[in-house]
Image (cartoon, rainbow, N blue to C red):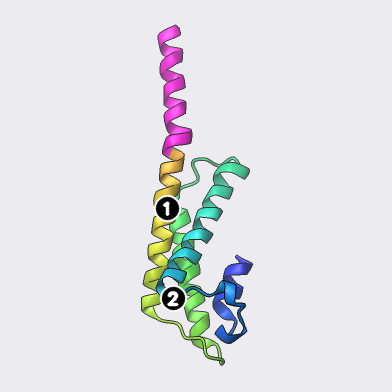
């Protein structure tokens, strides 16, 4: 989260070249999608909350993106917030939500269902 704030709130000319993307739209999608995916994966894997609601992760990601854009609009030095950027942030968050849903479905729900089916047939 701190890296996302750094990349979005510092003046553009102060950012290191490696942190810049050629297309700002793609940057928004990658940054906020990546943040949401890592947040969700952390909840699923490290905090052992595999069924943490995906809608909650999406809401948190979208609110984070909108808050950053509002903060950028208030910055005195060359950063601007826009509704279009909130849209690109939301696209990234939504793609991350889709990936998290697939991860949960393939690696948690289906193996659990297969195990239950196997236990029923043996019992």
Residue at which label 2 appears: 24
| Label 1 crowd bin: few (<14), some (14–19), many (20+), radius 10 Å | many
| Magenta span contains residue 120 | yes
Write down the region rendered in magenta. 105-123
Furthest residue toward bottom: 76
Viewport quadrant of the C terminus: top left
Image coords of residue 98 (percent x, y): 39, 50
Is residue 82 shown left or right of residue 10?
A: left
Is residue 119 shown left or right of residue 15?
A: left
| Magenta span contains residue 60 | no
Residue at which label 1 appears: 97
Q: CA distance from mark 1 to mark 2?
A: 21 Å
- Helix, strand or loop under label 2: helix
Image coords of residue 85 (percent x, y): 40, 75
- Helix, strand or loop under label 1: helix
Q: Residue at x 46, y 54 (%)?
A: 56
| Label 2 crowd bin: few (<14), some (14–19), many (20+), radius 10 Å | few
Image coords of residue 103 (percent x, y): 45, 42
Quarter assignment of residue 121: top left
Q: Residue at x 44, y 76 (%)?
A: 24
Task: Please say if 53 is above or below 90.
Answer: above
Task: Please say if 117 is above or below 102.
Answer: above
Q: Nearer the viewer, mark 1 or mark 2?
A: 2
Image coords of residue 2 (percent x, y): 63, 68
Is residue 8 shown left or right of residue 84?
A: right
Viewport quadrant of the N terminus: bottom right
Task: Please say if 117 is above or below 32.
Answer: above
- Specify the label residue 30 is tagged with: none
Quarter assignment of residue 13: bottom right
């Amino acid at each position: 989260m701190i890296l996302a704030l750094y990349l979005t709130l510092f003046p553009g000319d102060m950012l290191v070249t490696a942190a810049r993307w050629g297309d700002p739209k793609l940057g928004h999608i990658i940054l906020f999608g990546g943040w949401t995916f890592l947040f969700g994966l952390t909840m699923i894997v490290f905090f052992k909350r595999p069924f943490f609601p995906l809608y909650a992760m999406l809401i948190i990601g979208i609110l984070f993106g909108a808050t950053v854009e509002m903060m950028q609009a208030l910055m005195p030095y060359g950063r601007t917030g826009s509704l279009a950027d909130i849209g690109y942030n939301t696209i990234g968050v939504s793609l991350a939500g889709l990936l998290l849903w697939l991860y949960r479905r393939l690696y948690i729900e289906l193996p659990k269902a297969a195990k239950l089916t196997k236990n029923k047939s043996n019992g």
